[in-house]
Image (cartoon, rainbow, N blue to C red):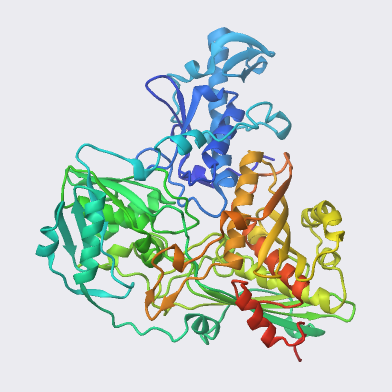
Amino acid sequence: MRPEAPVPLRAGPSISDWFRLDPEGKLIAMTGRAELGQGNRTALLQMVADELGVCLDDIAIETARTDRTVNEGFTSGSVSVSEGGVALRWAASALRHLVLDRAAETSGIRRDALDIEDSTITQDGIPTGLSAVQLSAGLDLNVPVTEFASPRQPDERWRRFRDIGRIDLRERIVGAPFVHDMEAPDMLFGSPVHPPSRTARLVSLDVDALRARPGVVDVVLDGSFVGILAKSRFEAARAATAAHAIAEWTDTAVPPNDAMAAISGSEENAETVFETGTMESAQGQRFELTVSRQFLFHASVAPSAAVAVWNRGAVTVWTHSQGVFPLRNAIAKSLRMQEDDVTVIHRPGAGCYGHNGADDAAFDAVLMARAVPGRHVKVVWSRQDEFRSAPLGPGMATTVSAAVSPEGRIVSADVVVNSAPHTNRPGVNGTPNLLAASYLSDPFPPAPAPADVPLARGGGAARNAVPGYSIPNVRLRKRIVSGLPYRTSALRSLGAFTNIFAIEALIDDIAAHRGADPIDFRLRHLDDPRSREVIKRLADLTGEERSRALPEGCGWGLGFARYKNASGYCAVMACVNCTEEVQVTDVHCVADIGEVISPDGARNQIEGGIVQSVSWTTKEAAKLEGTKVVAGGWMDYPILLFTETPRVAVELIERPEAAPLGCGEIAQAPTAAAIGNAVRAGLGIRVCDLPISRSAIIEAASRQPDHHSHPVAG
């Protein structure tokens, strides 16, 4: 039975949507996916080379740009390979079919005796002297992929091109590939003057005084949007600082006394998004806990940036956005333009983990460039801009309760998720969702009550809130708390980070209360063989280390999940030392992501997710004051230091016969859960309010004088 065609082929049905030849005769593969530092450009090129049989020197890959590539939406959710890569593989297979047909016609050799190896047409493995790339020239590629595609079977793949290094790494280290590095002879530099809070509006500003400052070319003023254009970045930044000092703003929004309390204590109607079995019929000893996560920053090392230029009423913008097509739509809508008059080209920048400030910086550049047609304008946000104006990862509070039978089986799980919105990306919920668009004199405000990502598409706030264990009675409800004055949107793994932490914490607490081994207790509640295997493999790998005696205050903890309950499987074991501060010393991970395209790239992605999760779990929390985000620099928002990075080991269970699954976000939540469970193992204290800092442990201990969790009454 032929597999179903990949979803991206709906937007790009023809081979010509995915391949072209450049003027020098090199084959160019085109993808709507953006390279955000995760290495997918390398992995996608590997898939093309493997499927076609063409040497890497003969092909190149072009990533997301609205004037050439297929509209694949946002590069998010760990689907660049599992969806975008599989679509490219199908297109490459169809192209191989056409090339071999042409080779048969040219040579007179039987079609079934031909193949492509190292860019050369072979007959029964012997080179014929015909070049596959040269034969591609002149082919009519404007034909349906699905009519000709027949991708190689698993046992035919990966004869070459498996362990190549990152194709972009050298340039990133010693070159100048980033949008921040772009230069043009006519370039001006722009600095936005963001309001002090999302809900503030401009009352007055001495524009003439700003225009008189050294190097300033113009001041763009449109409603509450203020942009400084100058001859140098330094002069633009100095003028923006001066503007902040003299601008007067008003803010009529009423902030909550405590944002996290407003989320956890929300009494809005909870929407039931999943239910199986009958909760009322589940009898047994009941356990419950509530976990909260603070608002988080993306905390990219470099700030957001973009370059834009207007020419004859049309605009081109270079950006490190996750979604060039949604951004094009949002820009066109904000300025009431035709989409065809907006070209958005992806250019590497600071790696993002969801919706950061990249799109906003792009729109800032567009607005400022409109004032100086024909000139390139580069906008680089300040660190203060990045902290105070980019979307935050939403604060959340997840409550999980369970009933356990006398035999020690979990017979019910009731999950309630309270969260600020996760879905305010450009173009989502019917509005541009660009910061400056809401400040214009003819504004586009954000949606007052953003819709969440449905569970059928992976979920937003409710992502991974359905326990991945064999529990007969499960109910999941969620509340999206929309009335807060803070700007929130997607951050890596969305709700999965908090929800899996809560579920895995309760699983561990129940196992501890019953005196059961946490590994065995999980395995007793898992029927899926792949879930069981990652946990068993992890237990075997770490068994010797875990058997060694640990100092007081140290402990090992386990976390497990299948991302989105449909993607990669990930089990993590972490060791913590809480004798002084909370220090994660060792992390072991076993992951099953189906067919592994680039083993090195997959391990790098998982390792990066682990390290970021350690930082989130033990250190990170955005500071809010009234309607404002008050962090202005790194001293206000500590993140994990290089000297605090744990030893990390990742093992992949490779399944070449299986579909590839995403890996970029699978480790985020299991790592957090493993750390929380390790703290409980080492101290006997369950810390439910993240981050797990020294002060959080002391606070949790004061609430649990005997240092143990208890089942709830009823």
Question: Measured along the vertical axis of the image, is residue 114 above or below residue 582?
Answer: above
Left or right: 36, with 445 as reference point: right
The one nearer the camera, 576 or 373, is: 576
> Which quadrant holds the C terminus?
bottom right
Q: Is residue 148 visible?
A: no
Q: Residue furthest front?
A: 580
Give coordinates of residue 288: x percent, y percent: 71, 82
Left or right: 116, with 542 as reference point: left
Question: Measured along the vertical axis of the image, is residue 637 above or below residue 4?
Answer: below
Left or right: 193, with 694 as reference point: left
Which of the 4 quarters of the picture holds residue 508?
A: bottom right
Give coordinates of residue 47: x percent, y percent: 59, 34
The one nearer the camera, 140 or 494, is: 494
> Which quadrant holds the N terminus?
top right
Give coordinates of residue 469: x percent, y percent: 76, 66
Residue appearing at x 17%, y 42% in the figure: 374
